[in-house]
Amino acid sequence: MRILAAEPGCHLFSGCGFEAPTIGMFFPEPWITGIPGTAGIDLYLVLLLIALGAVLLLWSWFSKKLTLVPGRRQSVGEMFVLFIRDQITRPTMGAKGDSFIPLMTAIFSFILLMNFTGLIPGGLPVNSDLSFPAMLAGFIFILTLIIGMKRQGGWGYIRNQIFPPGMPKPIYLLVTPIEILSVFVIRPVTHALRLFATMFAGSLLLAVFAYGGWYMLNISAEPALAALSVVYSGAALLGYILFFVFEILIMVVQAFIFTLLASLYINQSLEAAH
């Protein structure tokens, strides 16, 4: 995780206070500017390319020399695909969701690797920048519109979304505005914010643990204070390690939740409500 130390030489018992990392760590300065049509090349763009390359290399490796009787490498890839089918597409879309398994596999893999860039020393999760989760959520939102209008017709899809069947007509005066706001605004916004907020908060907490542990370590102090600082710093290090492991789990869970919701939204576009 990336750590910004405002005062690198400041430690416990040295007379200076602790300055925690700020949200400024999520806004790195561009490394290269002046590229037409872009804001430049920064840390996020490099990490995004790393994640994309890792996804392509991973699935190229899984699918290399496919055989009827899978070897160890192919078996791992097939287990991954079966996980997407059995835990995401089948529960949300049934058998008709099998045609979406490649898409859901790609989305899950890509988001997971973008989250894992936060484990690279000096890196951040790509999804701790709101623009990337927003782009992914926007893609799913547009895809659901296209699928829904293709399957149900333009007005048919909109009607099924904003006029839930089986309600007394006067109730629509209350329900329809809520459904419009829910389907066309709240759904894509929360889809993006859930992933972004979790990666943002997790990275900031890890940075606090890391920088706090470094601040509390002061071996140049008096012997008793130096020993005490080692204890404090060790406790912070232990907290960092525990939370680091927990953050890996959160990264996997968030990739799963984003993909699961994407599958659920697509299913709602495949079939009209009854």
Image: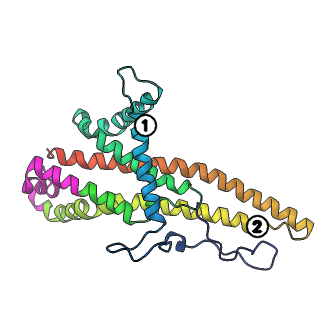
Classify 179 as above or below 103. below
Residue under circle 1? 61
Q: Is residue 153 left or right of residue 254?
A: left
Q: Over which residues does the magenta segment extend? A: 142-170
At which x and y percent is residue 222? 91, 70
Specify the quadrant that holds the C terminus: top left
Residue 28 included in the magenta stretch of the image: no
Q: Amino acid at mark 2?
A: Met
Classify 256 as above or below 161. above
Q: Earlier in the sequence, mark 2 or mark 1?
A: 1
Question: Residue 254 versus residue 46: which sits nearer the camera?
Answer: 46
Judged from the image, the secondary structure of the residue bearing numbered disc 1 is helix
- Which residue sits at x=31%, y=73%? 37
- Which residue sits at x=57%, y=73%? 22
Q: Amino acid at mark 1?
A: Trp
Q: Is residue 20 visible?
A: yes
Q: Say which mark, if any, is on residue 216.
A: 2
Residue 157 included in the magenta stretch of the image: yes
